[in-house]
Amino acid sequence: MSGYLESQLVILCLSIIYAYGIFLPAASGQLNLGAAGFITLGAYASGWFNLSDGLGISMPLSIVLAMLFTGAVSFMIAFPILRTRGVYMVLATFAFAEVVSGLTINMEFLGAAAGMPVDDHAPVTILVIAAIAVILFCFYFMSTRLGLALRSIHDDESVSVLFGVNVRLAKVAAFTVGGMLMGLGGALYGHHYNYIEAQSFNVLLSIYILLYVLLGGTQTAWGPLVGAIFFTVVPELIRNLAIEIGSTWLADSRFIFFGGFIVLMMVIRPEGVITRTMQDRVASIFSGGRRKNSGEAE
Amino acid sequence: MTDNVLTISGIHKSFGGLKVIDDVSLDVRRGSRTALIGPNGAGKTTIFNLLTGVYPIDDGTVVLDGIDISHVPSQDRVIHGMSRSFQNIRLMPHLSTIENVMLGQHSRARSFGNLMFPLGLLSKNKWRDEAEAALENAGIGSYPGEVVANLPYGVQKRIEVVRAMVSQPKLLLLDEPAAGLNEIETRQLQELLENVSASGVTILVVEHDMHFVRNLCDHVVVLNFGQKIFEGTPDEVHQNPAVLEAYLGRDDSQPAKETTDAS
């Protein structure tokens, strides 16, 4: 594989993992703009656990511990943060990410503003395997009764309560598992590039990841996958096209088209590219109408 | 002592200075089909919201099948055997028919193992089969490939009843189930509710359509301005002067006549 393709594949895998971390709470209607914070936690935790000057544990164990650490932090902040709603939750999670960033940049043992080297290297295959595992896990997770409850909460929280859904518990679970996934993504980032600095996990990253999820669609587990692939691949395709036709103007202004495209998507598909209805229609085409139309009374 | 599935004793509810429910007591006999009627703003839906714990009650007790649920959290009341439908359809618009019905099973599946069970991945499992059977019994197709938001109104109303029923309640609360339905849809709904009743579930229904109430119910409770003003059979309701006054107002010039439907 060429170096270019490999570097794009790495970005794609990380984007997918991050996107699912944001997707799980988003499926129940919780908007999390703090992705960078969770990624920072995962990256630094795993890096420090692995570092010979830190704890010096093996990379796989470091990654697992980093996930647990990020999950634990997510769990603890979930209770105050999930008391907020809508745009206030966006602000609260954003503030969390800023706090994490501010703390890491001032911690000497984490290299402070100079960043931190990470010892062990994670090759691209590990990232691909991790991304596939995360995709499969999230498809499973959303198909469970808890996943159904999350989607119900998204639609109508008070009715979900009346059918016995423990809304607080479901939201905290989604937020925590989402945090763990972003911790995993951060840890893999650190081990792949072998160098991390807090500045690279900035608010732009958080915004992009939330956009992947919202534009991809929060109703099905396909949404973040499609969103992440789209956002990672399309700008590169436009760039390659520009090189192909020798237009530096197109290469320079590709983000204008891309931005315009995003706006267009929001207008055409405000609920995301992949919706529940779309998924079902496609599924029934593939099953050739074999799914039983039991007692279609009307 | 008579066998009551629900006993409400002296409940009060005020919103600010406004007394919405003022010392209402009522019993719902096991297996009965009781209607709760009254003019707009009488407090019928508020009673449902107090029963299901949407609002806390200010005073009084609610006993469901021998258990005092007055202060049980909303999400746990369904476990004690009470489920409801809503005045305006409150199905989950982005879920399919089957998924909406499977949400109704939630109260019976709150263990960790059940929460982690992949309902959606396996096309055959006991929860999905049960939901499909419940829909089929109600004469509703499972409408694969459709979110409920796209289904006809009458079908959605019946899906709400099915969703409430799969929680296996002892008492089914229905908030204006017939509102907005045409004649055929109303008849289909009535059939469904008669089957529900025949299966031993007690029904408490808020309804404006007196024709529907007379066909379905064996007992009627009338509320006005948050107070119970009458209780009896559907036939007696039409002769009661207090009820007629609540609906039509007092007419001093001539004696109250036998009127048509109170709605």
Image (cartoon, helix red, strand yellow):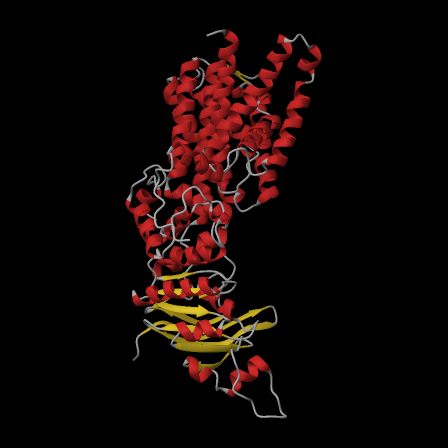
Q: In this view, does A139 lie above or below B43?
A: above
Where is A297 relative to A138, above or below?
A: below
**Relative to B157, residue A121 above or below:** above
Q: Position of residue A137 (x, y in %)?
A: 38, 31
Residue lying at 40% horizontally and 32% vertically, measured from the top left = A286
Q: Name the side, left or right, on which B196 lies relative to B46.
A: left
Name the one closer to the observer, A90 or B116.
B116
Farthest residue toward the right? A249
Closer to the camera, B5 or B87?
A: B87
Q: How many marks?
A: 0
| Front residue of this view, candidates A245 and A182 | A245
In depth, the one of B108 and B208 nearer the eye is B208
Work out whether residue A30 can be spotted.
Answer: yes
Q: Can residue A42 be seen in this view?
A: no
> In percent of the image, x 45 and y 39: which residue is there?
A174
Residue A253's place in the image compared with B139, above or below, is: above
**Residue A264 position within the rendered picture, expressed as x and y whole percent measured from the top left:** 64, 31
The structure residue drawn at horizontal position 38% and vertical position 48%, both measured from the top left corner, is B142
Q: Quadrant of residue A239 in the image?
A: top right
Question: In the shown orientation, is residue A68 left or right of residue B108?
Answer: right
Image coords of residue A207 (percent x, y): 60, 30
The x and y percentages for residue A7 are: 51, 13
